[in-house]
Image: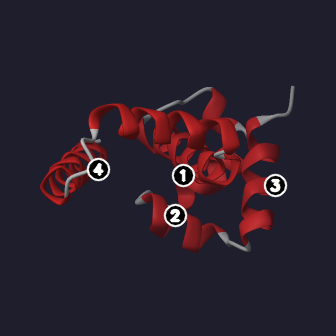
Amino acid sequence: MQEVGSEIRAFMEAKGLDQTTLAKRVKVSQASVSRALKDSARKRRGKAYLRLCIYMQQQNRRRVFDRLDRERMHEAIDHIWDVSEAHADAVAKVVQALDELRLSRMKEE
């Protein structure tokens, strides 16, 4: 299994990020990123460590979102949508509300 610091380093290299930029995107201190890169975060897994892991997972998930996931999403929407414009607006509002909920939960952390 790859060490945490190595995973973060590989993620940063793949995305072209330095410690300061990653820290700003994740909303943690640059020192937290530095500790995680040294694997010292393994002893101290606080909120900053968790935020780094969640951010990397989300970024990687966007890239890995494959054909089967898309098909499942399309099937779910086809199942609930009655093909009217009004219903399309309603479904879009539900999806947007879910995204806003996700963002508000991230801000709370």
Question: Which numbered disc, 1 or 3, marks the residue that appears first in the sequence?
Answer: 3
The answer to whether residue 42 is seen in the rendering is yes
**Disc 2 versus disc 1: nearer the observer:** 2
In this rendering, does residue 38 appear at all? Answer: no
Residue 10 numbered tag: 3
Q: Earlier in the sequence, mark 3 or mark 4?
A: 3
**Mark 1 or mark 4: which is in front?**
4
| Disc 1 secondary structure class | helix
Quote the CA–CA distance across marks 3 and 4.
28 Å
Using the numbered discs, state the Cα–Cα distance from disc 1 to disc 4 in whole angstroms: 27 Å
Q: Nearer the viewer, mark 3 or mark 4?
A: 4
User: Mark 1 or 4 closer to N-term?
Assistant: 1
Earlier residue among tags 2 and 1:
2
Closer to the observer: label 2 or label 3?
Answer: 3
Q: Amino acid at mark 2?
A: Ala
Contact flag, marks 3 and 4 (Cβ < 8 Å): no
* Marks 4 and 2, how far apart at CA: 23 Å
Residue under pointer 1: 32
Mark 3 falls on what kind of element? helix
**Residue at the spot of label 4:** 99
The CA distance from mark 2 to mark 1 is 8 Å
Q: Quadrant of the C terminus?
A: top left
Residue 12, position as x, y percentages in the image: 72, 62
Q: For the point 65% across and 56% down, which residue is it?
A: 34
Dot 2 corresponds to which residue?
Answer: 23
Question: Is the image coloured rainbow, by chain, by secondary structure, or in one colour?
Answer: secondary structure
Toward which corner of the image does residue 41 lie, by quadrant? Answer: top right
Say what amino acid the circle numbered 1 marks: Ser
Residue 103 numbered mark, or none: none
Q: Residue at x 72, y 50 (%)?
A: 8
At x 74%, y 74%, the residue is: 16
Label 1 near label 2: C-beta < 8 Å? yes
